[in-house]
Image (cartoon, helix red, strand yellow):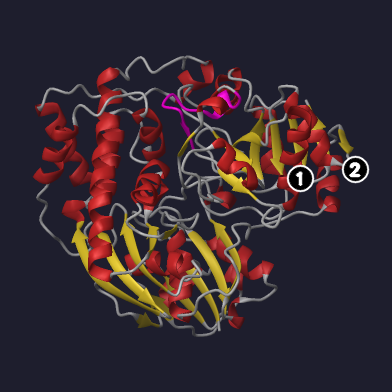
């Protein structure tokens, strides 16, 4: 069975993506934003990502057995043939003439559940899905065993932890999709308004409507409540101000906003622990899978991990809505993948392709025999390097194939890299760490290959990796093994030989407001428009 899973439509959607599955193997995954260069691909069909998946597998549309979509509107059946939808999703000018294919509509939270369970290599588990909103639900608890996933309990949009976090993010001037920023800001504040946050959350009483999108209404209730309680709304800083460097701090973000962020984070953690206990009580399982957009909150994930309510916890890297494309395809197949989940499933470019591009652009470049050693040397001397290797990773966090790397020892790199990317200066960074050294550096260490968990940095390491240690002494690492990413592992190993530090600062290779770079052209453009010092494209080195 060849199934193409999709997420994204023309109205009120985000994170459009495609995933191609053949029986028990994932062949390709791609997010639409990487092709259109519009971050999060709002209100978009996954046309370019679908085309990439088919091209990568060297097949065409008519080789497919079915289409799977990770959202099931209440007005449509689970399985249909809809020529109009197929023509919108697969325009003839890109995909040619098309045979009749069934479209499977998978409930959104079920798609999230399948995306994490069928890639977890677990045989039985509880599943907790927490996001803004699916069709109507905002939180779901499932139980999975074998190839079956069963819904146990759900909470509707009135209990949306994702919408709450989004509303506070808007109020603090960080935007509706600034959840990651709010999580970083929380470390600067104190959770003194947790009671007020709880009261506001409990006050939401929206009326259900067919095919409703409740995010705006939910946010309005929360923000009106905050104003009524005397809180001052922050004014969002403009991108022009960011470019001009007026970002030593947000003048609009006061201590109150930092405390609101800390209070919202604390409330979220409390609610997630309640849900985790409920999932344990309802299922009796020892394993837990977590997905949905809220699962990107690495601080909360570690609170769940450290609670030891469950013995084993798994979160896949695309737990936001792009992951529903993966889950929809896997759910239709109802088959667990046999191999360990590989996050590097996107496009890749040969040395020949890259050299041709560099020559055509008339850039000065050098081919390096040991690019890992050379990059480590450059990083150890304080340079910021764009690192572009192999197949592109999926999910919102760079995992060493489309990364910007820097020396984690130099505390000034925290400001320098933020400036280079056009980000707010207070935002934290995480390291990529040789996996076998994690226990030496972090408290309560467990493997974290997808940068989805947070750890306290041990006291004697906080100064040694000061550029990636947040104000509260924590960090969000990626653990790297040679088996998972040999070239990235080797580069970090070379850096350790030079400095004694088995880690590099790792952040996504992009400029503020843009998606990860996808192609060599994307990387070159970002390199010359940002504050990076060097660019590495496979085995080629480019200097400004």
In the rendered view, does 512 fall on the left or right side of 490? left
Q: Does the CB distance between marks 1 and 2 fall below 8 Å?
A: no
Closer-to-camera residue (55/132): 132
Query: Is residue 175 in the magenta section?
Result: no
- Residue marked by disc 1: 490
Which quarter of the rendering shows the N terminus? bottom right
Closer-to-camera residue (228/405): 405
Who's the residue at 31% across and 24% down the image? 189
Q: Is residue 399 visible?
A: no
Mark 2 residue element: loop
Closer-to-camera residue (432/525): 432
**Is the residue marked by circle 1 packed among few (<14), some (14-19), or many (20+) residues within 10 Å?**
some
- Residue marked by disc 2: 369
Q: Position of residue 230 (x, y in %)?
A: 12, 22
Q: Position of residue 67 (x, y in %)?
A: 48, 76
Q: Is residue 488 visible?
A: yes
Label located before the other in sequence (1 or 2): 2
Quarter where residue 210 is shown: bottom left
Count of picture labels: 2
Closer-to-camera residue (39/25): 25
> Which labelled disc corresponds to residue 349?
none
**Is the residue marked by circle 2 packed among few (<14), some (14-19), or many (20+) residues within 10 Å?**
few
Who's the residue at 74% across and 40% down the image? 493
- Which residues are drawn in magenta? 464-475
Q: CA distance from mark 1 to mark 2?
A: 13 Å
Who's the residue at 75% across and 48% down the image? 487
Q: Position of residue 342 (x, y in %)?
A: 61, 61
Quarter where residue 426 is shown: top left
Which quarter of the rendering shows the C terminus? top right
Closer to the eye: label 1 or 2 = 1
């Amino acid at each position: 069975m060849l199934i193409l899973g999709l997420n994204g439509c023309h109205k009120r959607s985000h994170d459009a993506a495609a995933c191609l599955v053949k029986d028990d193997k994932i062949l390709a995954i791609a997010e639409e934003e990487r092709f259109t260069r519009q971050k999060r691909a709002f209100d978009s069909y996954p046309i370019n990502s679908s085309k990439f998946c088919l091209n990568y597998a060297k097949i065409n549309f008519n080789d497919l057995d079915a289409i799977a979509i990770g959202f099931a509107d209440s007005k449509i059946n689970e399985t249909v043939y809809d020529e109009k939808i197929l023509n919108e999703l697969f325009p003839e000018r890109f995909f040619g003439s098309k045979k009749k294919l069934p479209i499977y509509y998978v409930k959104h939270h079920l798609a999230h559940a399948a995306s994490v369970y069928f890639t977890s290599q677990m045989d039985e588990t509880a599943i907790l899905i927490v996001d803004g909103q699916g069709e109507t639900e905002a939180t779901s608890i499932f139980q999975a065993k074998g190839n079956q996933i069963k819904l146990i309990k759900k909470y509707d949009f009135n209990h949306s932890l994702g919408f709450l976090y989004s509303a506070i993010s808007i109020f603090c001037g960080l935007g509706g999709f600034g959840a990651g920023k709010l999580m970083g800001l929380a470390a600067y504040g104190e959770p003194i308004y947790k009671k007020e946050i709880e009261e506001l959350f409990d006050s939401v009483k929206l009326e259900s409507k067919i095919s409703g999108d409740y995010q705006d209404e939910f946010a309005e209730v929360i923000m009106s409540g905050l104003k009524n309680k005397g809180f001052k709304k922050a004014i969002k800083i403009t991108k022009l101000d960011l470019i001009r460097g007026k970002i030593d701090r947000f003048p609009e973000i006061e201590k109150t906003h930092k405390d609101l962020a800390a209070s919202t984070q604390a409330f979220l953690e409390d609610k997630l622990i309640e849900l985790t206990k409920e999932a344990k009580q309802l299922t009796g399982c020892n394993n837990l899978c977590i997905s949905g957009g809220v699962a990107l909150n690495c601080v909360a994930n570690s609170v769940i991990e450290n609670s030891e309510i469950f013995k084993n916890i798994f979160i896949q890297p695309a737990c936001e809505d792009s992951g529903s494309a993966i889950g929809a395809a896997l759910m239709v197949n109802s088959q667990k993948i046999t191999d360990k989940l590989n996050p590097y499933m996107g496009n890749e470019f040969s040395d020949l392709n890259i050299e041709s591009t560099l020559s055509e652009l008339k850039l000065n470049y050098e081919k390096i025999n040991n690019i890992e050693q050379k990059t480590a040397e450059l990083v150890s001397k304080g340079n910021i390097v764009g690192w572009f290797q192999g197949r592109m990773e999926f999910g919102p966090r760079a995992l060493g194939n489309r990364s910007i790397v820097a020396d984690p020892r130099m505390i000034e790199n925290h400001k320098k890299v933020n400036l280079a990317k056009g980000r707010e200066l207070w935002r934290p960074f995480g390291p990529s760490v040789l996996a076998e050294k994690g226990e030496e550096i972090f408290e309560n260490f467990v493997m974290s290959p997808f940068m989805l968990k947070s750890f306290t940095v041990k006291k004697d390491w906080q100064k040694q990796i000061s550029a990636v240690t947040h104000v509260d002494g924590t960090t969000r690492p990626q653990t790297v093994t040679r088996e998972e990413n040999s070239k990235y592992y080797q580069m970090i190993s070379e850096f350790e030989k030079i400095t004694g530090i088995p880690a590099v600062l790792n952040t996504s290779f992009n400029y503020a407001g843009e998606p990860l770079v996808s192609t060599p052209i994307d990387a070159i453009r970002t390199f010359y428009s940002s504050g990076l010092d060097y660019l590495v494209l496979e085995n080629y080195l480019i200097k400004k």
